[in-house]
Amino acid sequence: MSRLDRTRTSPHQLRPFFSSQNLLNRADGSAQFDFGGSSVICSVVGPAEVKIRDEKLDRATIEIVARPLVGLPGVKDKTLERNIRETLEPLILSGLHPRTGIQIVVQTMKEDGCILSTAFNAAILALLDAGIPLKSILASVTCIIDSRTNQILLDPTIEETTHAKSTHVFVFDNKVSISSINPEDVAMDEDSKEPSHTGILFSDSTGLFTEDEFFECANACFKAAQAVHGFIRTAVSKKLEKEYQQTRA
Amino acid sequence: MASIKTEQPPGSLLPQGPSIVLPGDLLPAPGTRLVTDDDDAFITTSTTAPVIKLGPGLLVDDDSIGAIKAGILKHTPTGNRWWVESNQRRYVAAQGESVVGVVISKSAEHYKMDIGAAQHALLGVLSFEGASKRFKPDIKIGSLVYCRVSLANKDMEAELECFNPTTMKSDGYGELKNGFAIKTSLGLARRLLDPKTLILRLLGQHTPFETVIGMNGKIWVDSESPKKIILICNAIKNSEFLSDTECKTMVKTVIEKL
């Protein structure tokens, strides 16, 4: 079964990841994340001063600004902003920096499907780079159900999305990936139909689908998200190794 | 450092490979062997709950200890201290740290200082060695001042002082005249304060200079000529992601250009 996206052969294959941290020198933290032809760059400023109007006495104010590829931000970008803010707010330990502001700017650089997932992954890498205290990290993967073959396609391109019956975006935290190091737990998850979704942070589905299909999508995305988690860990380790090569000697 | 008494649940896991942790990773359970630079990094296995001291980057959540920042997990056997060595660019004031600040405005009682943190910090006009109501230093707006954080609280503006509270002497704190200041990451500033770091010694072999390193990432440099100051500043900034040998060649090439 070949996909519309000619570079991939399996429906569960993701496009190659790419990331780069600390690429903007005026921001406190920044990162770029690519899923193949989709690319998002994200900058973080904070904990910084905040307007009195937005100041919260017991925690940091988190502001997300989403910028589209072309033109002015519209309704789509406002939805993106809201989705990212509502997922990140419980993750950021904002109580440690009261009366400050954390501004996260998400700029789409290249668009080829899965922008929300790419933005989530770019945002978490930028937050790690900025050293904002976090409860855990996240990894996001999108999938669609193809209307012609009824197959789950992970990480779809724009072209593939046009044939989608339904689209699902999932975000998982890394607590699950840690507890599933025990191989017995993983095997158990595969056998039982309902996966252990304790680490699910965000899920957004559009289109028509059955309950079974939804859980199947969640399972497929969960497995793929582990690859993204692994990638994030390698990316951060590489950066840290470079930074601390002098102190180790 | 918060001192806590805790019992680790047996299920907590240790990070794979070198001790790099990401937010959400749990501190290993007592008795597990860690892959760290020092070989004796054991978590004490005693029947009683071990007393551990947590530094920056670690937080107690329910009954487990987890990392909240990406960095290298560090440990000292004396006092069983654990912390995460991480790098960032935004300064968060901490008591006792020496910082370089810029005077933003002054009032009858305080100078308002920019130390690169979320809020401005306050430096009392009398917080100088030998200052009294009649004799107090007059610092202009825009001047650089090397000072010590005397009070830091997440809910309040930080307070600064320009003397050592035990000896009441200036201890090198005070206004920085002449020279030039650059902003670097906090990790680089911390590393420059470590005598093992080569870059300052390498530069010192070629040209004499004075430097003040603030824990807030502001570094002040003064030398004979502006040309040399710029060269030293650039060399310090460039050294951040270089190894020791790369530093040596880098310093050699910039000195040749002088």
Image (cartoon, coloured by chain):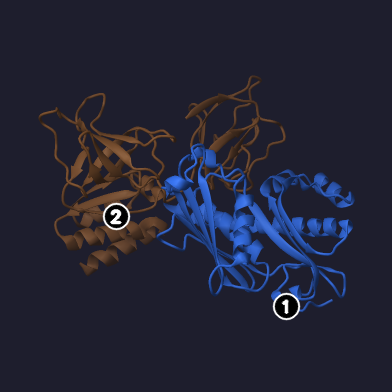
Chain colours: A blue, B brown
Residue B74 seen in render: no
Residue lying farthest to the top in this orientation: B48
Q: Residue B182 carries which label?
A: 2
- The residue at 16%/48% (across/down) is B177
Please state if A60 lies on the left or on the right of A175 as rendered. left
Please state if A16 lies on the left or on the right of A126 as rendered. right
* Vertical position of residue A10 compared to residue A219: above or below: below
- The residue at 60%/61% (across/down) is A78
Q: What element carries label 1?
A: helix
Q: What element carries label 2?
A: strand
- Few, some or many C-alpha atoms within 10 Å of disc 1 (few <14, some 14-19, many ≥20)? few
Please state if B105 lies on the left or on the right of A112 as rendered. left
| Relative image position of residue A167 (x, y in whole percent) | 76, 65
| Relative image position of residue A124 (x, y in whole percent) | 58, 54
Chain on which label 2 sits = B
| Relative image position of residue B117 (x, y in whole percent) | 38, 45
Residue that carries the numbered disc 1 in the rendered image: A159
Chain on which label 1 sits = A
Amino acid type at mark 2? Ile
Q: Of tags 2 and 1, which is closer to the observer?
A: 1
Q: In which quarter of the image is the N terminus of chain A?
A: bottom right
Amino acid type at mark 1? Glu
The residue closer to the viewer here, A39 or B256, is A39
Residue A21 seen in render: yes
Report which quarter residue B8 is drawn in.
top right
Please state if A201 lies on the left or on the right of A31 as rendered. right
- The residue at 72%/35% (across/down) is B11
Disc 2 and disc 1: Cα gap in Å?
49 Å
- The residue at 62%/65% (across/down) is A75
Asked if the residue at tag 1 contacts the one at tag 2, i.e. Cβ–Cβ closer than 8 Å, the answer is no
